[in-house]
Image (cartoon, grey):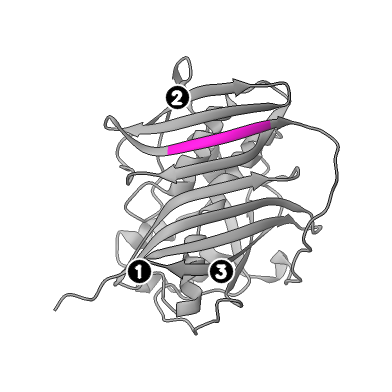
Amino acid sequence: MTIVADLLSLLELEPLEHNIYRGQNRDLATGRVFGGQVFAQALVAARRTVPDQREAHSVHGYFLREGDLKAPIVYFVDRPRDGRSFTSRRVTAIQHGEAIFHLSASFHIEEPGIDHQHRMPDVPAPETLPSELELVRARADRFPEPLRTVITQERPIDIRPIRPADPWARQPNESADRAQRQVWFRVIERIPDTPMLHQAVLAYASDYGFLPTALLPHGIAFRDPRLFIASLDHTVWFHRPFRADEWLLYVSDSPSAFGARGFVRGAVYRQDGTMVASMAQEGLIRLREPAG
């Protein structure tokens, strides 16, 4: 099985009963279930119960408890509404008898309407940039085992940062109105045409490195031993069609952080400049003083 097939398998939930599905986990070297995985799997579970010709346009998730990598996740789907134009779903993710995640999603038929968007930033082409995996492998000796083995393994999604950051080193401080993260990403192999699958992959990737954008104005390294960081909620709005196996630019910034919570927002563009999705997230960010 290729690494891309492994990702698709992660999103191919096992039906257990009417409106009930089960998903497996993949370790991303964090010691806990990756939030983007739970978000994407819950979206897939919701979409499985929605009539054809309706795709997700608004998806909101709340992370309630840390997920256990060693246990599968069961998804329960509730069907509040099936209207003429919109369909709404609620999903609860369960582990060990407790809810670890809630998702609300709305699906819409395709309709004509007004059309405008923000312009995509002018950035270097993805072909001119090294991948994040290449950058990580170049400094692999700085990662302890077994973290090194996991973080340097092959990845199904090629991520190419515009301005790479060292996860161990303190970064230059940036003012809040300038702090911005820009990365290109795409699945490394062609995947099936199903729109739901491309939405699920984007949802999965949208949580990767998103909240650490709030660290940029403070020059805090992601691997700072004082740092505890965790997503509290995550929202994705899908605007226009796209393919997750073609280059997408993910631009994020952090307009505010206060009270141990950081807020980040983002936008995703096709390489031709078309905006395809927007995101927002609030997360817990704590700096603990070192022991002793």
Give whichever of discs 1 and 3 has the lower sequence position: 1
Magenta-drawn stretch contains 106: yes
Q: Secondary structure at mark 1?
A: loop
Q: Magenta stretch: dominant SS?
A: strand
The crowd level at tag 3 (other Cα within 10 Å; few <14, some 14-19, many 20+) is some
Q: What range of the chain is rendered magenta?
A: 102-107
Magenta-drawn stretch contains 105: yes
Picture coordinates of residue 132, whole percent (x, y): 54, 65
Vertical placement of 143 versus 40: above or below?
below
What distance separates the C-alpha of mark 2 from that of mark 1?
36 Å
Q: Residue at x 45, y 56 (%)?
A: 153
Q: Which labelled disc corresponds to residue 21?
A: 2
Which of the 4 quarters of the picture holds residue 110? Answer: top right
* Mark toward the viewer: 3 or 2: 3
Q: Are marks 1 and 3 in contact (CB under 8 Å)?
A: no
* Mark toward the viewer: 2 or 1: 2
What distance separates the C-alpha of mark 3 from that of mark 2?
37 Å
What distance separates the C-alpha of mark 1 from that of mark 3?
31 Å
- Residue found farthest to the bottom: 172
Q: Which residue is mark 3?
A: 255
Q: Residue at x 64, y 26 (%)?
A: 87
Q: Is residue 153 visible?
A: yes
Picture coordinates of residue 166, whole percent (x, y): 46, 76
Q: Secondary structure at mark 2?
A: strand
Callout 1 amino acid: Phe
Picture coordinates of residue 152, whole percent (x, y): 44, 61
Q: Which residue is mark 1?
A: 143
Vertical placement of 10 versus 163: above or below?
above
